[in-house]
């Protein structure tokens, strides 16, 4: 399963990309607003950090304007993926952009039916929101399982991008459910590595090694 980082903070992204373990990035209007910078400038800077996919979302809700914005975003860099809302206008735009060779990420998916329609529209990625479903007392991970089954049944090539990830356990469950990608906030990405026994074991090894008085170099 690939790892994307869900942020528009370029400092956090640089640290994540420097690990060599991150495959791409997703952004949204809320993250851009939080960054407090020019939208196109931020996207261009992120695209220079990685050759992987970088999702940049349209701002309009009407199909004609979505199409114009999507084409403009795609001009920023070859690795831009145009992010579109899961509405009829968004799906119409998705189909047109896909036919023109522009990659798309259909976002705000909460049902298998929505995911099915996005695949039929030719979406490169579908973004089911796990955490937001969990917040309502539903099982967000069940949605990943359902989408995986539908896509496998009919050979849809749309990739499942697990979004609204809230914890390290969400990442593992998404991987077990067959998601192709998890897009993860920096805080959760950093937590993937953490375990108290790893920290304790390393401290013991360092202490014992120092006791030998030896050096490897």
Image (cartoon, rainbow, N blue to C red):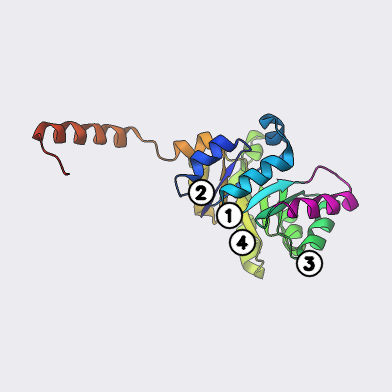
Give the residue number, with chain letter if any, for mark 4: 149
- Mark-to-mark CA distance, 2 and 1: 9 Å
What crowding class fits label 1: few (fewer than 14 Cα within 10 Å), some (14-19), or many (20 or more)? some
Question: In this rendering, would 165 be left or right of 196?
Answer: right
**How many residues crowd mark 3 within 10 Å: few (<14), some (14–19), many (20+)?**
few
- The residue lying at 82 percent from left, 49 percent from top is 69
Q: Nearer the viewer, mark 1 or mark 3?
A: 1
Instruction: Report if the CB atoms under discs 4 and 3 are less than 8 Å apart.
Output: no
Contact flag, marks 2 and 1 (Cβ < 8 Å): yes
Q: Which residue is mark 2?
A: 22
Mark with earlier residue (1, 4) = 1
Determine whether, in the image, residue 64 is placed left or right of residue 10: right
Residue extent of the magenta highlight: 58-76
| Mark 2, secondary structure of its residue | loop
Of callouts 4 and 3, the N-terminal one: 3
Res. 90 in view: yes
Residue beneath label 1, please?
Answer: 52
SS of the residue at dot 1?
Answer: loop
Q: CA distance from mark 4 to mark 2?
A: 26 Å
Residue 60's mark?
none
Sequence order check, earlier mark of 1 and 3: 1
Q: Residue at x 66, y 31 (%)?
A: 35
31 relative to 162, above or below: above
Q: Quadrant of residue 164?
A: top right
Q: Are marks 1 and 4 in contact (CB under 8 Å)?
A: no
Disc 1 to disc 3, C-alpha distance: 21 Å
Between marks 1 and 4, how big is the CA–CA gap? 26 Å
- Give the image location of residue 184, x and y in percent: 56, 42
Helix, strand or loop: magenta stretch: helix
Q: Which mark is residue 99?
A: 3
Please state if 212 lies on the left or on the right of 34 as rendered.
left
At horizontal 64% and vertical 68% (from top left) the residue drawn is 153
């Amino acid at each position: 399963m690939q790892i994307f980082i869900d942020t528009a903070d370029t400092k956090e992204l640089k640290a994540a990309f420097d690990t060599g373990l991150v495959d791409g990035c997703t952004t949204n209007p809320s993250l851009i607003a939080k960054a407090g910078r020019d939208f196109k400038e931020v996207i261009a800077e992120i695209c220079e950090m990685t050759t992987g996919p970088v999702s940049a979302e349209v701002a309009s809700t009407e199909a004609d304007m979505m199409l114009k914005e999507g084409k403009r975003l795609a001009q920023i860099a070859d690795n831009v993926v145009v992010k579109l809302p899961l509405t009829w206008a968004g799906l119409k735009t998705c189909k047109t952009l896909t036919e023109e060779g522009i990659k798309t990420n259909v976002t705000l998916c909460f049902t298998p039916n929505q995911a099915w329609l996005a695949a039929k529209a030719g979406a490169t990625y579908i973004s089911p929101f796990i955490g937001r479903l969990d917040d309502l007392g539903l099982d967000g991970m069940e949605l990943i399982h359902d989408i995986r089954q539908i896509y496998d049944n009919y050979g849809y090539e749309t990739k499942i991008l697990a979004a609204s990830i809230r914890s390290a356990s969400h990442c593992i469950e998404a991987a077990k459910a067959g998601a192709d990608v998890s897009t993860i906030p920096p805080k959760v990405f950093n937590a993937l590595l953490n375990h108290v026994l790893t920290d304790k074991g390393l401290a013991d090894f360092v202490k014992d090694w120092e006791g030998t008085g030896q050096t490897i170099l």
